[in-house]
Structure formats: C-alpha cells, structure tokens
Image (cartoon, coloured by chain):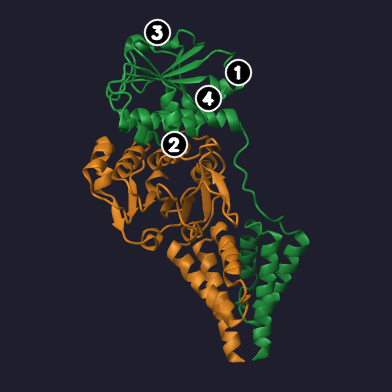
Chain colours: A green, B orange
Amino acid sequence: MLDDVRVVLVEPSHPGNIGGAARAMKTMGIHDLALVRPRRFPDPQADWRASQATDVLDAATVSSNLEDVIADCGLVIGTSTRERRIPWPTQAAAEFAAELARDGSRGRPVAILFGREVSGLTNEELQRCNLHLVIPANPAYPSLNLAMAVQVVCYELYKAAELGETNVRTGWDRPYATREELEGFFVHLEEVLRAVDFYDPKAPRQAMVRLRRLFERVRADETEVGMLRGVLTHIERAIEDQ
Amino acid sequence: MLDDVRVVLVEPSHPGNIGGAARAMKTMGIHDLALVRPRRFPDPQADWRASQATDVLDAATVSSNLEDVIADCGLVIGTSTRERRIPWPTQAAAEFAAELARDGSRGRPVAILFGREVSGLTNEELQRCNLHLVIPANPAYPSLNLAMAVQVVCYELYKAAELGETNVRTGWDRPYATREELEGFFVHLEEVLRAVDFYDPKAPRQAMVRLRRLFERVRADETEVGMLRGVLTHIERAIEDQ
C-alpha cells in the first residue's frame, strides 16, 4: 500500500519544506514525491533538510500542472484545515489511513495533495479530490508547517499499513518471574521487614499491602526477583554479622 | 492533560528545530517547552520557524542540566529509536498517549525528553525515564527530524486528550512521586546496598541499572516512595544497632 502513495506538493514556496517532506516520507516508507510548480527546486536548502532522503528528492517529478500529476491516480485526497463553502466528504488522517489499509489501493496510485504554505489548496483543487483529509489540531492554532503535515499523514499511513493493531514489541530479555518465585519474595520481604522492625504495630497489614501492590504491578522478571531476593539475603547477613 | 505535558529538548544543535518544535507543540495545544543546553538560543532561525508560536519560545525555560528540568515531574518519558543493551519498558507513542489520557497526569508535570539531533539521548538520560517512547517508522530509515518527532508525539497526545474514547479511569489515590523524590530514593538505595555489601565488585553498575529500571517502570506514587525510604532507614538502623 505505501508503494502506491504519492505525496503531491502544490506550489511549495520554501525549498526547506520540500526537503523536510522528503525526509518525512522516507521515515514512513513512502517514496513517490511530485512537485507542482515549486518556487525553487532543486535547491541546496531542500537537500540539506532532506538529510538521508535525497534519493526521494532525486526521484521527484516536477510538473507545471496538477492534472498531469493526478491523471493516473485511483484516489485523490486533499489536505485542508479551512472550512469550505460546499462541504466535502472529510476524514481524519487516522481514519482514512485505516480505511486505505483495509481496502487497499486497488493497483492505482493514491495522491495526497498538500497546498501552499500560506493559502493551502484552492477551491478548484479541492474539488478535484475524492475526499478531504484533516489533521486534528488545536482550534486556536491549527496551522501545521507543510512538512510537518506531510510527516503526520505519512505516519498515519505507515502505522495503518505496517502495524495494524499490533504495536511495538518491547523485546524484553527475561521471562516473567513465576507466581511461586514472586510469593517466595513476598514471604522473604515480610521476614526482613519484621527483622528491621519496620512495621507500625497499629496497622501492620497496610504497609505490606501497599508494597505488594507495587511489586505486583511492576511485573518483575525472574532476574529481577532473583536480585531482590539477593538484596534481602544481604540485609539479613548484615544484621546478623554485627 | 495537555497543560501538564512538558517537552524537553536536550542539547538541540539547530535553532530551527527549536522553533519547529515550538510550532508543532502549539498546533497540538501543548505550551511548556524546556531547553537543556541549547547550542544557540534565542536565535532568529528559531523565531522564523516558530511562525505564530513565538509565545511558546518566549516562555521556554533554558537550563544547564536535565535534573533541574525534571525534578518536579511525576512521569519522565524518553524518546528513543536505538536498541539498548538492557531493555527498558517501551511503548509506541499512540499507546502511551491513550494511557495518559485514561489515567491522567495526577497533577504533576509529564516530561517528554527528545535527544540530540545526531546522537539522541545518552544511556544515563534514558535510565532516568519511567519508560521509553518509540515512533513507529521505516526500519530502513527511522530517523525523524527532531521537530518532526515532537510533532508526531504531540499529535498523538492531542488526539488522545481531545478526541479519545473515554475509558475507565484507574482512579489512583496518590500523585506520582516527583522525580526529585525518586532520585533521592535511588541515592538512599545505593547507600544501603553498599552497606549490606550487595554489589558484585566485578559488575557494580549492572545491578543498580536493573534495580533502577524496575523502580522506574513501576511509576511509584509519593506514599510508596515514602514507604520505601522508610524501609531503607529501618535497615540502616538495624545494622547500626547491632
């Protein structure tokens, strides 16, 4: 699906934003960049902001009109923050990404249009779109930088395409301690607390319940429980040795 | 919840990224920016990239060390892309945002640390974090620009805070311990471990890092940290009394 996504920047003014958009795309596995009447391109500013994504810039197409860029596309999506006079079908970025991941691109490029830094897309351009995409944002200041908007939309597409419901794996290096090991630790802990006279005789259970809750919710691994047992053993020896 | 989020940039090199981060924050309703040893700030590049978010820059704090910036925080979250030798509890940005929206900040600032443009956060900095946050990205080029990373994380926080499905609240009865309280506990713990001769002289740091990781990820509340300090004090007295 990501291979079919084409990011289209319409009349970007600042070459830095073109480079920033290229980098943003590549971090999310998207490589097809089309530029419509960029004010300055190529440009050293674009290369600098692209960092390791100059390959995306090098492969970008430059065109003098939008129609050519979207002619072969199966879906054309316009990004927009402003309200339009005639309401258009509108989706939040995450919602569209989920739908695209589910339904696929059906073998045709999917163009996502990003407008000018100051004025966005024109009404005519927005009316060439199947639907409009919005990035949820602070109503008092919803004005994302152009490359930032590309980053957020590509991020949502990447998440939907590559991760679906699954999330990052933590990659822990040890199994959880067994219940038996954990209960053994609690017994040992209670002995040590008694030996150091920790308990408030008026409310002896309260402290132990709070400590248990803490060591329950941390879901300790077997190495950690072994280490905690080691600490308790050292404390006992230090008391006896004196 | 968004009012309690503090974005912390650790040693940013490029003032443009500071401005870009400020703008990204404001578009997502987040305003508390802290800078640790910025190479150049204030700077016209920062103002230019901030666009209409110069108010966030103007209110930013500048500090010479990270400890001061996070001392009052209830949660400290480190952003990271690299694998670490000792795995730390890790969540994807969306997952953490959903959890924070559900559980709340419990009245303490939540610091989200973003590292240097080239090298990220150091191991020491990452070990001062309750958990690590990752932005799902193209494994072949996961290197988001610093301000872009701020944009994506703030976007997820905004979505979760403002749009999220309301879920059950955990309804905890105490605020998180502050970072300062937690660091005080670690110092105390290390003293006691030394007093009971716990350390393996061949690998003294290894054990402490694992113990730190355990007590970072449990996100202890202030009563729990107070109780743990009480246990440590009782152990010290028991050793001396003998």
Choose mark 2 or mark 1, whichever is in front.
2
SS state under label 2: helix
Residue A103, disc: 1
Q: CA distance from mark 4 to mark 1?
A: 10 Å
Choose mark 2 or mark 3, whichever is in front.
2
In the picture, the quarter occupied by the N terminus of chain A is top right
Tell me which amino acid carries mark 4: Ala
Q: Which residue is mark 4?
A: A97
Residue farthest toward the left in the current orientation of the protein: B44
SS state under label 1: helix
User: Is A71 located above or below residue B58 in the figure?
Assistant: above
Q: CA distance from mark 3 to mark 1?
A: 25 Å
Residue A52, disc: 2
Q: Residues within 10 Å of mark 3 (few under 14, many from 20)?
A: few
Note whether residue A190 is visible: yes
Q: Position of residue B85 (x, y in %)?
A: 59, 56
User: Is A10 located above or below residue B114 in the figure?
Assistant: above
Tell me which amino acid carries mark 1: Asp
Q: CA distance from mark 2 to mark 1?
A: 32 Å
Numbered disc 1: what chain?
Answer: A
